[in-house]
Amino acid sequence: MRVPFAQPVTVTRYVAGTRSSKGRYTPGAAAPVVVRMLIQPLGFNSDAVEELADQMGVRHLSGRLRIYAEAELMTGEKASSTQADRLSYQGQVYEIQEASLWPGRLPHWRCTAKLVDEKTP
């Protein structure tokens, strides 16, 4: 997969956490992964973006990014205790909220990321 204008970005990927017999959660280890991607801040510049915001149930898109990636970015799953991939963009940390494979002549992963507080586990 090749995404035009993509740059290598280091993503933090987490393995699944575990729960002790007492129910205490221990987060999984983190490892850096380099993925080529194109990052664009989301804004209300088209009807399609407004429709996306409605589907996501949000009133504004500040703190959200659209990402076109050459490799899959992982979203978090509560059932498997997996934390979503995180990346740094313009000095702030974002977490992958949605990822889907976009087929066609230039197949790629189309993702949405949300700004998070670095202190959030």
Image: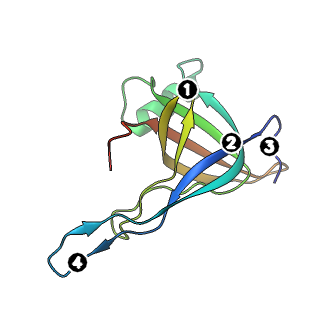
In this view, which residue lies farthest toward the left? 22
Residue corresponding to mark 3: 3
Determine the secondary structure under disc 4.
loop
Q: Residues within 10 Å of mark 3 (few under 14, many from 20)?
A: some
Residue drawn 64% across and 57% down? 72
**Residue 88, horizontal then vertical, whole percent:** 55, 37
Residue corresponding to mark 1: 42
Whether residues under marks 3 and 2 lie with C-beta atoms below 8 angstroms apart, the answer is yes
Q: Quadrant of the N terminus?
A: bottom right
| Amino acid identity at mark 1 | Leu
Determine the secondary structure under disc 3.
loop
115 relative to 17, above or below: above
- Marks 2/4: CA distance? 37 Å
3 relative to 64, above or below: below
**Residue 24, horizontal then vertical, whole percent:** 19, 69
Q: Give the mark nearest the N terminus, 3 or 1.
A: 3
In this view, which residue lies farthest toward the bottom? 21
- Drawn side of residue 23 relative to residue 18, left or right: left
Residue corresponding to mark 2: 68
Q: Give the mark nearest the N terminus, 3 or 4.
A: 3
**Residue 6, horizontal then vertical, whole percent:** 77, 39
* Mark toward the viewer: 3 or 4: 4
Residue corresponding to mark 4: 20
| Amino acid identity at mark 3 | Val
